[in-house]
Amino acid sequence: MKITVLTGAGISAESGIQTFRASDGLWHEHRIEEVATPEGFAANPALVLEFYNERRRGLLRPEVLPNDAHKALATLEQALGDDFMLVTQNIDNLHERAGSQRVVHMHGELLKVRCSRSEKIYPWLSNLIGDDRCACCGLSGTLRPHIVWFGETPLRMHEIEQHLMTSTHFVAIGTSGKVYPAGGFVEVARKLSIYSLQLNLDAIDSGSKFDEHRQGKASQLVPQWVEEVLNGQFV
Ligand code: OAD
């Protein structure tokens, strides 16, 4: 058994982090073009930096902790080793804090910044402001959130595709599948006859391409599913 898991905002919802497309989600409060595109950043850097500063402060709140779904995936990684890849669209660090060691953050990471000149990446826990100087080039205005914005290429795609295409199972957890290329992983799985399972709070979509859908909260569904894998009941 070789598994590729894709997680989305739904897995962190029960840890107190807002999803994107819910009626109280981030994209109902902010315009994507303004805060999550290179053009938006060029037009109003202060607004974009503050948007991510707010997210970063939110993530660092003491009450935001990994939940049982994050923890179960860390256990699965331990058990399956290289036959397991955890790909996340999330920019939080809750998978790592639950114990996962090899998380692939395809949309970047909130607690890192990047120099747009050298492409060097730095850990960053405080607010990022336009005046902050980069450690590599000593200039201000070169640092940006290490986030993949709309119109930019997601990270580590080659590695992800290699793993996905040689997997026996693909499992999508807490993601609406609205953003590509992640939203297309299930189509890749289907073409290659890789068994696909969706775990989501929502009921199954009418046009779903998944072989199996389980409806419920990630904190309940994920530990149950991991238990099945470890007991050899999920085949
Ligand atoms: P969305 O907000 O689009 O979808 C979250 C999904 O999680 C929905 O399908 C919910 O039904 C489900 N959900 C909510 N609570 C849940 C729970 N407790 N248990 C299980 N499922 C739950 O978030 P993503 O699919 O992650 O990209 O969004 C993908 C990308 O769109 C994000 O990475 C971000 C955004 O624009 C960038 O910013 C580049």
Image (spheres, rainbow, N blue to C red):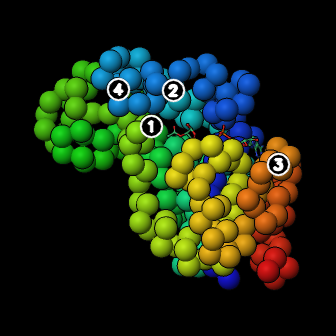
Cα separation, mark 4 vs mark 1, equals 10 Å
Cα separation, mark 1 vs mark 2, equals 8 Å
Q: Name the image quarter holding residue 197.
A: bottom right
Is 204 left, or right, of 111 in this rendering? right
Q: Residues within 10 Å of mark 4 (few under 14, many from 20)?
A: some
- Tell me the SS state at disc 2: helix
Residue type at mark 3 is Ser
Q: Name the image quarter holding residue 226.
A: bottom right
The mark that comes first in sequence, 2 or 4, is 2
Q: Looking at mark 2, is its residue's CB closer than 8 Å to ligand 1?
A: yes
Q: Is residue 193 above or below residue 182?
A: below
- Tell me the SS state at disc 1: loop
Which residue matches tag 4?
A: 39
- Tell me the SS state at disc 3: loop
Q: Looking at mark 1, is its residue's CB closer than 8 Å to ligand 1?
A: yes
Proximity of marks 4 and 1: CB atoms separated by less than 8 Å: no
The mark that comes first in sequence, 3 or 1, is 1
Instruction: Give the label, 3 or 1, closer to the camera.
Output: 3
Which residue matches tag 1?
A: 150
> Where does the image place residue 48, in percent across and percent down from the top left?
41, 23
Residue type at mark 1 is Phe
The residue located at (85%, 79%) in the rendering is 233
Q: Is residue 77 above or below residue 143?
A: below
Which residue matches tag 2?
A: 32
Which residue matches tag 3?
A: 206
The residue located at (25%, 40%) in the rendering is 115
On-image quarter of the N terminus: bottom right
> Where does the image place residue 148, in percent across and percent down from the top left?
42, 42
